[in-house]
């Protein structure tokens, strides 16, 4: 069973991927002079060079998407670290100072199916830091770079003919491409899925459902149901779970309702 953390991760990742692809298609029209600003769009836009403007906007959209994807990864990491069913090793990740240290340690706990996954996921973290912090020196280690280059042919085969040496060059020059980010996202999703399968955190136990409610910031809404004036509160609770957690079975919902109680804020 996919964890709620994985479901949210995949959902949050899907939106920027679709949006980025849509933006790139639109900017291609701008670059070719096929798009003009409509009069009803009340913004200032009169580029002296549409090609340059389109390419700058494309770069901004790619960089913004990478930042969003990295935050989605860290949100998933927070989910598994705080999950009541997580092992002591996973919970101890919170003691690491930086995001890259947490990811490094996670790979020590759950080794990736392919050796190049680790440096590529770390590349996501480091690239984000370079985008947000212009003086950042975040970088892969020499060994991590060697792993990527040694897997060059495999990565070309499995990831749309990506040239990983060119990706490393782009990273050093702080210029990410659409192919770079697409490959990084693809590998990150594969690893997160592997982590989720390995941990097997979810079961329809009350302790997990309580965590899901708190994780989703629904504690207040859930507790208000107890003060509802409606005669049949079971319908209210059932609607709550069907709205926010549709994957929970009807049988489990009935059990929750029969034993429900307000949740304490943490």
Image (cartoon, rainbow, N blue to C red):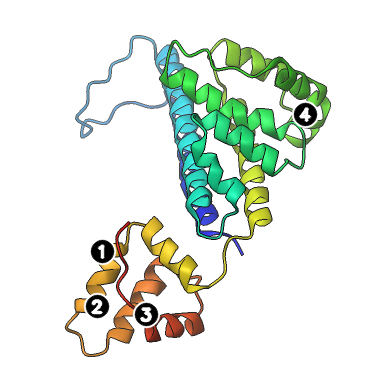
Which tag is nearer the camera, tag 4 or tag 1?
1
Q: Secondary structure at mark 1?
A: helix
Using the image as rendered, state which of residue 191 and residue 87 is in the foreground. 87
Looking at the image, residue 226 sits to the left or right of residue 10; the answer is left
Query: What quarter of the picture does the C terminus occupy?
Result: bottom left
Do the CB atoms of the residues marked 1 and 3 lie less than 8 Å apart? no
- Separation of residues labelled 1 and 3 (CA atoms): 16 Å
**Distance from label 2 to label 1 (Cα)?**
10 Å
> Where 261 falls versus 35 (above or below)?
below
Of tags 4 and 3, the one toward the viewer is: 3
Residue occupying image coordinates x 79% and y 24%: 152
Image marks 4 and 3: residues in contact by CB distance under 8 Å: no
Residue corresponding to mark 2: 226
Which numbered marker is on residue 238? 3
Q: Which residue is mark 1?
A: 220
Few, some or many C-alpha atoms within 10 Å of disc 1 (few <14, some 14-19, many ≥20)?
Answer: some
Q: Position of residue 184 (x, y in %)?
A: 62, 32
Q: CB atoms at circles 2 and 1 under 8 Å apart? A: no
Q: Nearer the viewer, residue 92 or 12?
A: 92
Front-lying residue, 244 or 155: 244
First-in-chain label (4 vs 2): 4
In the figure, residue 52 lies in which quadrant? top left
Q: Is residue 142 visible?
A: yes
Q: CA distance from mark 3 to mark 2?
A: 13 Å
Residue drawn at x 62%, y 36% is 105
* Place of residue 162 in the rendered image (x, y in percent of width and height, measured from the top left): 71, 26
Q: Is residue 32 visible?
A: no
| Number of marks in the rendered image | 4
Which quadrant does the N terminus fall into? Answer: bottom right
Q: Earlier in the sequence, mark 4 or mark 3?
A: 4
Residue identified by numbered label 4: 156
Distance between mark 4 and mark 3 Cα atoms: 49 Å
């Amino acid at each position: 069973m996919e964890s709620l953390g994985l479901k949210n991760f995949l959902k949050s990742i899907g939106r920027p991927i679709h949006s980025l692809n849509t933006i790139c298609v639109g900017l291609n029209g701008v670059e070719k002079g096929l798009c003009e600003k409509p009069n009803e769009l009340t913004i200032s836009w009169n580029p002296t060079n549409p090609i340059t403007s389109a390419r700058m906007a494309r770069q901004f959209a790619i960089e913004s998407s990478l930042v969003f994807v990295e935050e989605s990864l860290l949100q998933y990491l927070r989910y598994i670290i705080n999950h009541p069913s997580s092992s002591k090793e996973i919970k101890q990740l919170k003691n690491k100072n930086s995001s890259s240290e947490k990811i490094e340690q996670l790979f020590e706990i759950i080794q990736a199916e392919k050796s190049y996954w680790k440096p590529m996921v770390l590349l996501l973290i480091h690239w984000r830091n370079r985008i947000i912090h212009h003086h950042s020196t975040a970088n892969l280690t020499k060994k991590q770079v060697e792993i990527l280059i040694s897997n060059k042919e495999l990565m070309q085969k499995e990831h749309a003919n990506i040239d990983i040496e060119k990706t490393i060059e782009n990273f050093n020059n702080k210029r990410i491409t659409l192919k770079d980010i697409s490959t990084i996202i693809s590998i990150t999703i594969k690893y997160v899925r592997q982590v989720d399968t390995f941990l097997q955190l979810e079961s329809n136990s009350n302790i997990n459902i309580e965590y899901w409610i708190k994780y989703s910031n629904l504690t207040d809404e859930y507790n208000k149901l107890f003060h509802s004036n409606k005669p049949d509160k079971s319908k209210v609770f059932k609607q709550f779970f069907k709205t926010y957690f549709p994957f929970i079975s009807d049988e489990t919902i009935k059990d929750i309702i029969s034993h429900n109680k307000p949740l304490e804020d943490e």
